[in-house]
Image: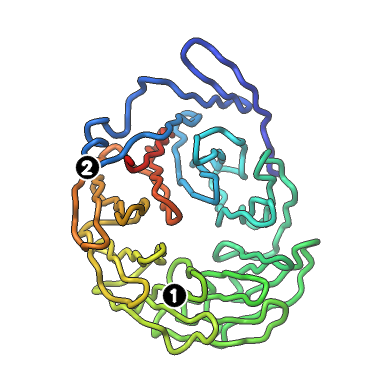
Amino acid sequence: MLKVSACRLVLAANLLFVCSGRRCFSEQVGTERLVSPELLQHAGLEVVWHKKLPMREKEQLDRLVVVADRIYALSSENYIVSLNREKGNLIFGRSFGRAGTAVLGLDHYDDKLISIVGNQLVEVNPETGTELSAKRLEFGITCPAARNSSCYYIASTARRLRTYRAEDKVRLYEAAAENDSIITSVIADDNSVVFATDGGNVICAAADKPKKLWEFNASDGIVGAIVRDGDSLFAASKDTYVYKLNMETGTPPVWKYQTDALLDRGPRVTGDVVYQYVRDKGLTAIDKETGRFMWRVDGGIDLLAEGGGKAYVIKSEGELVVMDNSRKKRLYSANFARVSKYAANTVDSKIYIADQTGRIVCLKPVD
């Protein structure tokens, strides 16, 4: 079972400690910085808040995830910390399964934090960290679950999309691609569920019955998560193309953009731009409306944030590159060599960076 730790506050000297079980969170002025003030000034950024997460010996920060108004930090021992991403306030800290247990997805729906932990579908109160339910599934799972107001949709290693009633987790029905390929991504709303496969399928079905509405087929597998933005879907394929699909019809694609190398991640989508990592090449920006090339950062691995017409790109060698989207040109860069973890934020201009020891910093562009 998953366990939640109680929190207590202790104020001492110049340190603010928030203790959860044997773990203490601290914020201390003057601690070693991830990025120097001079470099931040050069990049037009300022610190909003910083935190030092509790890490035991040999434990490391594994990932950062932005979800709504929260940022979740998951450690190598599956200890999860929830912070308010505007101010960095601690919401809760708790164990999220044994170390080594796979955690697939962290998302909010209907006032619940939802995740797949090992072979359990877990619902947690996002305000307290208290476990609300844990449904054990008798099969392996290939990607994060999707949820709408009535159902969960869970992709099994048996190459089936299994549907469960959200209220009581009773299994209802299942669906699959005709080529019996592995499901790599699922999204859903109250009208439809869309799933992609490693056979290149993107299939849209009715949300309440195993009825296919449309199907698009790329020439190779769909990688990473498919992204919905309004009435459009965006997907990356091993066939080197990024596709924009119409949610109502699916095919033909609205546009397809060919990259110059194998794709192994899904795209990042913002208001006007699709950002796609291309293996051994860098991060490419594509105009979301037209599908045309905008720019590429050689060695870029991901988008940190976007705001004021600028894109903030992290490179593999620890460099921040700031791009001007309207002029399609590089503006400046800064040394982020100490940064080893980050969250990809596609909703606003805040940047979340960290290192493996659990130091987290929130930055924003200077007004």
For mark 1, give the secondary structure.
strand
| Residue 222: image tag | 1
Task: Give the image quarter of residue 43.
Answer: top left
Q: For residue 109, which quarter of the picture?
A: bottom right
- Residue at the image point whose x is 33% and y is 43% from the top: 365
Q: x and y percent of residue 308 in the render?
A: 33, 53
- Residue 177: % across, % down: 57, 83
Above or below: residue 162 compared with residue 119: below
Kind of residue indicated by mark 2:
Ala
Q: Residue at x 48, y 75 (%)?
A: 232
Which quarter of the rendered picture does the C terminus lie within?
Answer: top left
Q: Amino acid at mark 1?
A: Ile
Pick whichever, 248 or 299, lies toward us. Answer: 248
Find the residue positioned furthest to the top: 13
| Numbered badge on residue 82 | none
Distance CA(mark 1)–CA(mark 2): 34 Å
Q: Residues within 10 Å of mark 2 (few under 14, many from 20)?
A: many
Counting residues from the start of the chain, the first of labels 1 and 2 encountered is 1
The image shows residue 29 at horizontal and vertical percentages of 39, 20
**Figure quadrant of residue 174:** bottom right
Please determine whether, in this image, residue 13 is positioned above or below residue 237.
above
Q: Residue at 61% x, 44% y: name it.
A: 96
Write down the residue under mark 2: 334
Can I make out residue 240 in this image?
no
**Secondary structure under the numbered disc 2 in the rendered image:** strand
In the current view of this chain or complex, which residue is farthest to the front? Answer: 367
Q: Is 18 drawn above or below residue 162 in the view shown? A: above
* Residue 218 visible within the image: yes
